[in-house]
Image (spheres, grey):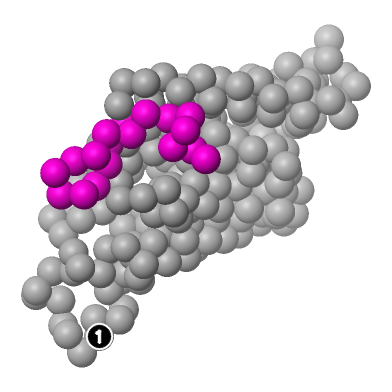
Amino acid sequence: MLSFLVEFVKKDDGAYLLGKGGYFAFAAFILLLVIAAAVITTRKDKNNDLRTVRLTVSAISLALAFITSFIKFELPFGGSITLFSMFFICFIGYLYGPATGLTAAFAYSFLQFIQSGGTYFLSIPQVLFDYILAFTALGIAGFWYRRKHGLVVGYIAGCIARGVFASIAGYLYWMDYMPESFPKAIAFLYPIVYNYFYILAEMVITLIILAIPAVRRAIRRISYEATQNIRG
């Protein structure tokens, strides 16, 4: 059904890219999604100040995730380590729970597709696993909100969940791109090794940064202001 709404251009090798109309359609869809999410996830907030803070913090975190996803270290064999972009999406879930977290992550998945997937993709199902499901999975961090060590545990869970869907995409669509230097005896592990190498590398670096006392204090302060310290 998506092909009727979005303009796709077929490349010579059988892959696709988004046409100009496709980028416009996706941008409009994301805008509508954000507006709908704002209405749905804040309806239960009777306090107008809390509603405003929730929307503001979520929007800032989503913007930071998108911006930092452009600041990345490209690995020689594929994949990249970004400047903590996954953390900002998981942070939304940690602050406000799974509904808000998954909604923000879902919107972010479309932003990621526009950013990097729109220039080369194989099919709609491949986009579903590589982008929509993989990045939306970061939102499961919200299931650990308000729990002790919830930010760290939720972030780890989100990263692992993203890797699951990315690895499934690897098995289904990208095995032919496995480099010849990869050991043939463990070729079945290639999608797992490929995807989890850069995902876990970014996760470990982020966790090290989060363990710095000054950063922990800043996160606690931001979390308090974003969820509790609402003043008129």
- In the image, residue 71 above or below residue 30: below
Looking at this view, is 219 or 212 the one in front?
219
Range shown magenta: 1-18
Q: Callout 1 environment at 10 Å: few (<14), some (14 to 19), or many (20+)? A: few
Q: Front-most of 110 and 125?
A: 125
Q: What percent of the width, then of the height, locates residue 3?
A: 44, 37
Residue 17 sits above or below residue 229 on the image: below
Q: Quadrant of the C terminus?
A: top right
Residue drawn at x 39%, y 38% is 113
Q: Is residue 159 visible in the rendered structure shown here?
A: no
Q: Residue at x 60, y 47 (%)?
A: 139
Q: Amino acid at mark 1?
A: Ile
Magenta stretch contains residue 58: no
- Residue 5 part of the magenta segment: yes
**Farthest top residue?**
232
Asked if residue 86 can be seen in this view, the reply is yes
Relative horizontal placement of residue 228, taking residue 35 as reference (left or right): right
Q: Residue at x 20, y 55 (%)?
A: 78
Position of residue 78 in the picture relative to residue 133 (left or right): left
Tell me the element at label 1.
helix
Question: Residue 25, position in %: x, y?
Answer: 45, 23
Q: Nearer the viewer, residue 216 or 131?
A: 131
Depicted 134 relative to depicted 51: above or below: below
Q: Locate residue 35, reporting x and y percent.
A: 66, 20
The x and y percentages for residue 122 are 30, 51
Q: Which residue is under mark 1?
A: 186
Is 86 on the left-hand or right-hand side of 8? Answer: right
Residue that sits furthest to the bottom in the current view: 185
Camera-side residue: 222 or 179?
Answer: 179
Task: Give left or right: position of 14 versus 49.
Answer: left
Q: Residue furthest left?
A: 181
